[in-house]
Image (cartoon, helix red, strand yellow):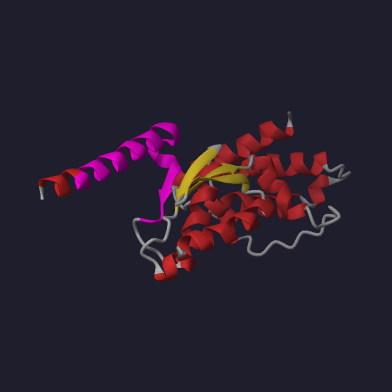
Amino acid sequence: MGIYFRMRSGRVSLHSVWKAFDEAEFGTKNILNLRESLPTAADARHRAEAWLRERQVSGTSEVLLITGRGNQSPGGVSVVRGAIVALLPALRRRGVVTEWREHTPGSFVVKLGSISSLLDAPKRKRDRALVATPSDPRPLAELDSSTLSLLRRLAVRSLESLGVQHPEKFVEAEMLIKFNSLAGGVAPGVEGEGRLRKAISTALDQLDE
């Protein structure tokens, strides 16, 4: 009995050591543990995408995504891991992530794209003709004037970088396009809008590089 408890204690201790290593390497804010809450595949995809977008907008370059191995799942296959494996290529096409690698059999290290890659992604399959089809302009009306000013600067700068001769004709539509791209990981409220301003400022800096 004593050996059994020592073995259990040893396993828990080893798990704690690896957890401490991960937290030291990535920081607690940059680790998403999907294994603990046992979500469905759909919930895992939704939570992971929202979190990865939020981390990207916050300027994080690399994060740890824990899915679990699926040892206790039907057939020994983790539905959460499968959902994330399917999600990551889609997020790469959208400019959210650039690459990933297996960290352990139950986790992935994910490298996030730059803000400029996020903004450029929707235009990859277009000829960059400015045919803007914004969905709903109402979110812009809820933004602070300082945020709107930054967003307008970004829209104008982006249009100029594409060689548009009269960017003022397209500014409002371009502002909404940029907002829709950047706001994917921004929660509502003062804190979320602060992260949005930071993302816009980062995008402006990257355009000027």
Q: Nearer the viewer, residue 70 or 23?
A: 70
As drawn, is 169 to the left or to the right of 197? right
Residue 199 percent across, percent down from the top left? 58, 40
Q: Is residue 150 above or below residue 47?
A: above
Q: Nearer the viewer, residue 117 or 97?
A: 97
Q: Nearer the viewer, residue 90 or 151?
A: 90
Q: Is residue 93 magenta?
A: no
Q: Nearer the viewer, residue 192 or 56?
A: 56
Residue range in magenta is 7-35
Residue 202: name its quadrant: top right
Residue 117 percent across, percent down from the top left? 69, 44
Quarter of the image where the C terminus is located:
top right
Q: Is residue 19 magenta?
A: yes
Residue 170 percent across, percent down from the top left? 79, 52
Q: Is residue 123 above or below residue 31?
A: below
As drawn, is 105 to the left or to the right of 118? left
Q: Main secondary structure of the magenta part?
A: helix
Identity of the residue drawn at 82% across and 57% down: 126
As drawn, is 26 to the left or to the right of 205? left
Q: Is residue 84 visible?
A: yes
Residue 114: name its quadrant: top right
